């Protein structure tokens, strides 16, 4: 369980969730992803199921983002050559423009791209503290783009402590926000002890880590794609009527399986087995229990032939079996 709360992660949460009001599925462009805040932002967008585009200022940063963060090359732009961005970002964001643009670079002077890259009603957050709103293209306002200019150093302690809580919670529930490098360690309790805010809701002894600007944030592997099982397939569980098998059957059914065949020596006799089979059936899953000892080759091959036929035939087989059962 991570007992650390990186300051930059708390800042990223503030920028993305509080200032930009991010929602899952939005496209976010982080201008300047090479530093610690940029890396956390990129990671957070992905953790919260958004589409992230980034810019970097060196080949090393580009390589890091591709290799460790699995960000596709066509989503990484060169900060030092922003001329082609507008059209590239536009194309990458499906011609719609960006939902959110986060400016995290200390250099550059082009502000026009903002008005053409962000979609109407979108949002721009600037954390550089260098941009005077007066230099912005007025069309930005005409198109209803929300602008926020943040000074992260000026976040009040009370707000920071809430952010630490939220970040810690995210790290604990999601295990997606991680970091290893550290330069300064501060105890959170000590950090907020001079503040006037009460220390409510604080986990016991969490530690705040402040990272140097050029630290890297290791990313956990992306979660696997959701399990999708073909409804027309037949899924066979050998010996599947015990606890593990029944749990597996429920999982298969929940992920789209619509026909399960259990191979079992003794059949479904217990109450739990019958209840589970009934519940699977009620959830739209056809269920067959075939009495068969999988360690007996002859028996198995016999049933194996039956199950290799099309699903329809298997259903037919089940019907025949039921009829035979009824006849008995
Ligand atoms: C992004 O950063 C580059 C280089 O630092 C700068 O020239 C450019 O204006 C920035 N772009 C936006 C849209 O903020
Ligand atoms: C991003 O910040 C840089 C440096 O402060 C500034 O030059 C640039 O114009 C900003 N971009 C936007 C779109 O505000
Ligand atoms: C940002 O906040 C810090 C701390 O309050 C302050 O020292 C600094 O001057 C502020 N920066 C700007 C540009 O206002
Ligand atoms: C990171 O920054 C520190 C201080 O600014 C510098 O000494 C160090 O060489 C930098 N490390 C990398 C990998 O750039």
Image (tube, rainbow, N blue to C red):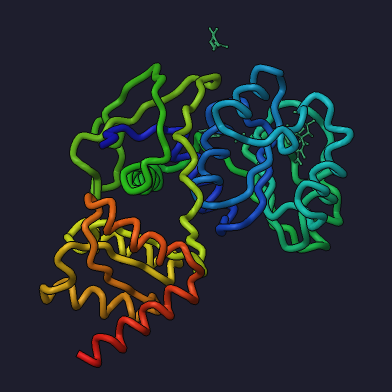
**Residue 30 horizontal/vertical position (percent):** 66, 39
Quadrant field for ligand 4 = top right
Residue placed farthest to the left in the image? 270
Q: Tell me the quarter of the picture where residue 126 sits.
A: top right
Q: Tell me the quarter of the picture where residue 140 sits.
A: bottom right
Please count the marks in the image: 0
Q: Is residue 91 left or right of residue 281?
A: right
Q: Considering the image in quadrants, where does the N terminus appear?
A: top left
**Residue 209 horizontal/vertical position (percent):** 37, 27
| Residue 248 against residue 282 in the figure, above or below | above
The front one of 135 and 312 is 312
Residue at image coords 54%, 45%: 46
| Residue 257 against residue 95 in the figure, above or below | below
Residue at image coords 34%, 61%: 302
Q: Considering the image in quadrants, where does the C terminus appear?
A: bottom left
| Residue 31 against residue 15 in the figure, above or below | above
Residue placed farthest to the bottom in the image? 327
The front one of 66 and 34 is 66
Residue at image coords 88%, 35%: 84
* Residue 247 in view in this figure: yes
């Amino acid at each position: 369980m991570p007992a650390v709360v990186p300051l930059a992660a708390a800042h990223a949460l503030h920028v993305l969730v509080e200032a930009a009001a991010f929602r899952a599925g939005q496209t976010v462009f982080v201008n300047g992803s090479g530093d610690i805040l940029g890396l956390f932002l990129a990671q957070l967008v992905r953790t919260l199921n958004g589409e992230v585009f980034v810019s970097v200022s060196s080949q090393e940063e580009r390589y890091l983002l591709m290799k460790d963060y699995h960000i596709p090359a066509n989503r990484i732009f060169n900060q030092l050559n922003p001329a082609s961005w507008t059209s590239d970002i536009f194309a990458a964001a499906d011609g719609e423009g960006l939902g959110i643009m986060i400016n995290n670079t200390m250099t550059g002077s082009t502000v026009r791209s903002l008005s053409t890259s962000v979609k109407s009603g979108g949002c721009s957050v600037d954390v550089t503290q260098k941009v005077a709103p007066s230099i912005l293209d007025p069309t930005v306002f005409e198109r209803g783009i929300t602008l926020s200019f943040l000074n992260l150093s000026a976040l009040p302690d009370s707000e920071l402590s809430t952010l630490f809580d939220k970040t810690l919670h995210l790290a604990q529930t999601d295990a997606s926000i991680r970091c290893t490098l550290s330069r300064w360690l501060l105890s959170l309790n000590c950090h907020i002890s001079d503040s006037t805010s009460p220390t409510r809701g604080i986990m016991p002894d969490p530690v705040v880590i402040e990272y140097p600007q050029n630290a890297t944030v290791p990313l956990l592997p992306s979660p696997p794609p959701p399990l999708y099982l073909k409804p027309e397939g037949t899924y066979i569980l050998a010996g599947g009527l015990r606890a593990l098998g029944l749990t597996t059957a429920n999982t298969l059914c929940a992920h789209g399986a619509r026909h399960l065949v259990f191979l079992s020596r003794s059949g479904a006799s217990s109450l739990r087995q019958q209840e589970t089979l009934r519940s699977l059936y009620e959830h739209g899953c056809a269920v067959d229990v075939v009495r068969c000892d999988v360690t007996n080759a002859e028996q198995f091959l016999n049933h194996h032939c039956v199950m290799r036929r099309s699903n329809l035939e298997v259903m037919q087989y089940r019907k025949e079996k039921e009829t035979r059962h009824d006849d008995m």
